[in-house]
Image (cartoon, grey):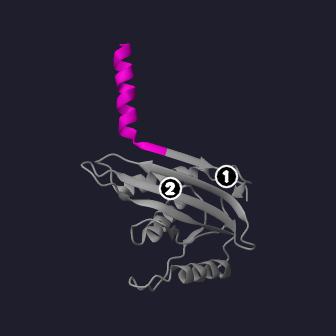
Amino acid sequence: MNLIKRSAWLVLVLLAGCSVMQSQQGPKIPRQSAFAVIPLINLSQTPQAGEQAASVLAAIMRAHDAGPVVLNLPEERDLLVDNSGEQRQQAIQSARSGGAKFLVSGTVEEWRYKSGLDGEPAVGVTLEVRSASDNQLVWSGTAARTGWGRESLSVAAHKVLDELVGAMPLTSRP
């Protein structure tokens, strides 16, 4: 019986993939505050990973009952020209003028399938929550995950972002 329990735990560990997450405690953030998700800075090799991550992040924040949450993606983009810095500044200005209390952004460090036989998904993201009024850092966290061969990149990204949003010090009191 003991061998069966050990085997079951080993299978669960192997199926779970490998992940790590760290975050600061930070002050309490009212859950019902107005949040603006800004495209994350893409430090990965995957085009538009920052925008993909921001889109998933906004949906996960809404699923965690935060909000209102507004996703500020650029309406027009030229895929051949990297003007992401200018687009980020426009998104920040738009969020501030739209009444956002907090800006949620960060970086995407990894967003790809690893090479090799299994082609495991690998995701690494750092998030920051900043005050929209003075740009002061309120909370930050970072997480990374390597999935298994049958797991999609989107599933690995959802797990990483869900873990980070779950670590945000959101409180029910406004």
The picture quadrant where one finds residue 170 is bottom right
Quarter of the image with the N terminus in it: top left
- Residue at position x 67%, y 50% in the image: 24
| Left or right: 21 in relation to 45 | right
Q: Which residue, given by chain and number where applicable, does mark 2 sit on?
A: 161
Q: Which residue, given by chain and number where applicable, does mark 1 sit on?
A: 169
**Residue 103 at x, y = what percent?**
64, 69
Q: Amino acid at mark 1?
A: Pro
Q: Amino acid at mark 2?
A: Leu
Q: Nearer the viewer, residue 65 or 90?
A: 90
Identify the mark nearer the N-term, 1 or 2: 2
Mark 1 neighbour density, 10 Å: few (under 14) some (14–19) many (20 or more): some
- Residue at position x 64%, y 82% in the image: 93
Q: Is residue 96 magenta?
A: no
The picture quadrant where one finds residue 112 is bottom left
Q: Nearer the viewer, residue 163 or 62?
A: 163
| Left or right: 6 in relation to 25 | left
Q: Is residue 84 above or below residue 5?
A: below
- Residue at position x 34%, y 19% in the image: 4
Q: Is residue 16 magenta?
A: yes
- Helix, strand or loop at mark 1: loop
**Disc number placed over residue 4 in the picture, else none:** none
| Left or right: 66 in relation to 123 | right
What whole-number distance in Å separates the C-alpha atoms at marks 1 and 2?
A: 15 Å
Q: Provide the major secondary structure of the magenta segment.
A: helix
- What segment is highlighted magenta in the picture? 1-19
